Amino acid sequence: MNLNLSAFISGLIFGLGLVLAQMTNPEKVLGFLDVAGNWDPSLALVMMGALLTLGTLQRLIRKPSEQIQDTDLQTCVNPKAKIDTKLITGSAIFGIGWGLSGFCPGPALVSLTAGLTGAYVFVAAMFIGFLLFNIVHRGR
């Protein structure tokens, strides 16, 4: 299958999953994030379903005789990575944006197709953030 077609189909399925799970609905996401108030646990069920699907598919795809090697883990984890100010600041900005808007990047991009004003504002702010990051960290 053509790589571009495969990527398109994968993205289409992912976007459809976000819509069906209502992750493109900011009120639903904010209800999930409101653990101290009127918490809506339904998105936790979506996450558990995703993890079960991943675990099942990994078991089916990986041959029983294959074991995870140390080198497999080293390709996923950067041993030189450290928790620094840049990581903490970026995480905080992401969390604040998610909590204020009810959008995270993937669902926000999908929500653009629905014409939600909040999605346009969020995506514009996200790209401004990308640009500011590149300006601040240029040459580092």
Image (cartoon, rainbow, N blue to C red):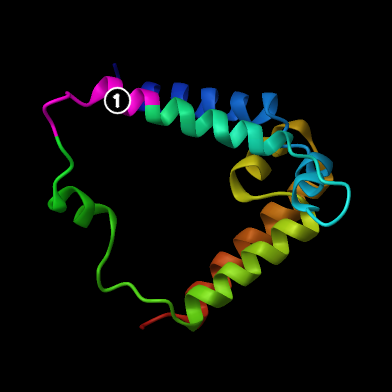
Q: Please report the bounds of the magenta region as a residue range.
A: 56-66
User: Who's the residue at 70% across and 32% down the image?
Assistant: 113
Q: Position of residue 51 (x, y in %)?
A: 48, 34
The answer to whether residue 23 is seen in the rendering is: no
Q: Could you tell me which residue is drawn at 17 percent across and 24 percent down?
A: 64
* Screen quadrant of the C terminus: bottom left
Q: Is residue 140 left or right of residue 125?
A: left
In the drawing, does residue 1 fall left or right of residue 99? left
| Residue 28 lies in quadrant | top right
Q: Secondary structure at mark 1?
A: helix
> Where is residue 2 shown, x and y percent of the image?
30, 20
* Residue 86 location (% of width, % of height): 49, 78
Q: Is residue 17 visible?
A: yes
Q: Is residue 55 left or right of residue 77?
A: right
Q: Where residue 111 appears, x then y in whole percent?
A: 71, 37
**On the rendered image, what quadrant is the N terminus found in?**
top left
Q: What amino acid type is highlighted by mark number 1?
A: Arg
**Front residue of this view, candidates 100 and 134:** 100
Q: Which residue is pictured at 68% across the width and 28% down the height?
A: 19
| Circle 1 residue | 59
Going by the picture, which residue comes out furthest to the right?
Answer: 38
Q: Is residue 99 magenta?
A: no
